[in-house]
């Protein structure tokens, strides 16, 4: 067990699909509560609820209404599990999303951080990077690029990663990639973590079977490779991100 001031490090899961019946995550309230219980049993104390948001499918207002209704169904159970849960989303980045007047309600816990899913076929070309630049400059939002291990260009190019970081982007990986990805991907992810070019981790859990909320098994791999202090700092950084009052970001 990873040590800390109270005997263990309080873990943060920044990427989950636990809200019931809102996307391709938890099918119903029962499964959502099972997922919360599973995370709580693995030293996780803070969970970001990040259902998919597709602008071409529904308005932000309609999405926020559905999200609030789903949140109410699990809020009490999360409290019973001693979990702090925050509303957010995993927004799919398209040009039409940037036509909205305001995206702040999609961000994590009233911060300026937005978990963002790029199209799967993105090469992060100059044109595609320009969309990210527009998002940052127009809305004052800092994108957290979700599951960056899915984008080969990001894993292959240090210069591309550097460009995105200088732009203001942050990077998140799915913990399962540290044990289920290829050897080369796993080695690359550990190196990026050690070099602080990956900033956040999450389970990206969707259900209790194929994409279950497995946190401890994978975070322990990071401790084995990079040490206890590194894991502690990783969690501290995530908690700072979730605290709007402590957020001091220069754009």
Image (cartoon, rainbow, N blue to C red):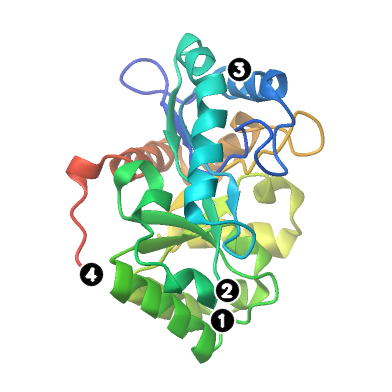
Quarter in which the C terminus is drawn: bottom left
Mark seen at residue 124: 1
Mark seen at residue 109: none
Mark 4 nearby-residue class (10 Å; few <14, some 14–19, many ≥20):
few
Q: Are marks 3 and 2 in contact (CB under 8 Å)?
A: no
First of labels 3, 4 by sequence position: 3
Q: Which residue is mark 3?
A: 37
Q: Residue at x 33, y 63 (%)?
A: 141
Q: Nearer the viewer, residue 37 or 183?
A: 37
The image shows residue 2 at horizontal and vertical percentages of: 47, 26
Q: CA distance from mark 1 to mark 4?
A: 21 Å
Q: Residue at x 66, y 32 (%)?
A: 213
Left or right: 156 in relation to 143: right
Left or right: 127 in relation to 205: left
Above or below for 53 versus 139: above
Mark seen at residue 154: 2
Kindly state the secondary structure of the residue where label 4 is placed.
loop
Q: Residue at x 74, y 33 (%)?
A: 207
Q: CA distance from mark 3 to mark 4?
A: 38 Å
Q: CA distance from mark 2 to mark 4?
A: 22 Å
Kindly state the secondary structure of the residue where label 1 is placed.
loop
Q: Which residue is mark 4?
A: 251
């Amino acid at each position: 067990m990873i040590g800390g001031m109270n005997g263990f490090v309080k873990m943060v899961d920044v990427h989950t699909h636990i809200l019931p019946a809102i996307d391709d995550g938890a099918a119903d309230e029962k499964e959502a509560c099972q997922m919360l219980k599973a995370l709580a049993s693995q030293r996780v104390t803070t969970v970001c609820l990040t259902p998919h948001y597709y602008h071409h499918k529904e308005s932000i207002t309609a999405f926020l209404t559905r999200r609030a209704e789903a949140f109410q169904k699990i809020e009490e159970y999360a409290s019973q599990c001693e979990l702090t849960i925050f509303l957010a989303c995993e927004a799919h980045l398209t040009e039409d999303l940037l036509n909205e007047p305001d995206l702040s309600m999609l961000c994590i816990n009233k911060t300026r951080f937005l978990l963002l899913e790029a199209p799967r076929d993105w090469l992060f070309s100059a044109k595609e990077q320009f969309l990210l630049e527009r998002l940052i400059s127009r809305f004052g939002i800092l994108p957290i690029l979700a599951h960056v291990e899915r984008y080969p260009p990001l894993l292959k190019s240090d210069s591309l990663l550097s460009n995105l970081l200088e732009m203001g982007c942050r990077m998140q990986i799915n913990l399962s990639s540290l044990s289920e990805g290829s050897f080369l991907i796993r080695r690359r992810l550990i190196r990026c973590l050690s070099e602080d070019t990956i900033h956040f981790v999450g389970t990206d859990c969707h259900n209790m079977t194929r994409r279950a909320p497995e946190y401890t098994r994978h975070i322990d791999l990071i401790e084995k490779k990079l040490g206890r202090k590194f894991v502690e700092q990783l969690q501290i950084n995530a908690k700072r991100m979730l605290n709007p009052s402590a957020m001091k970001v220069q754009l």
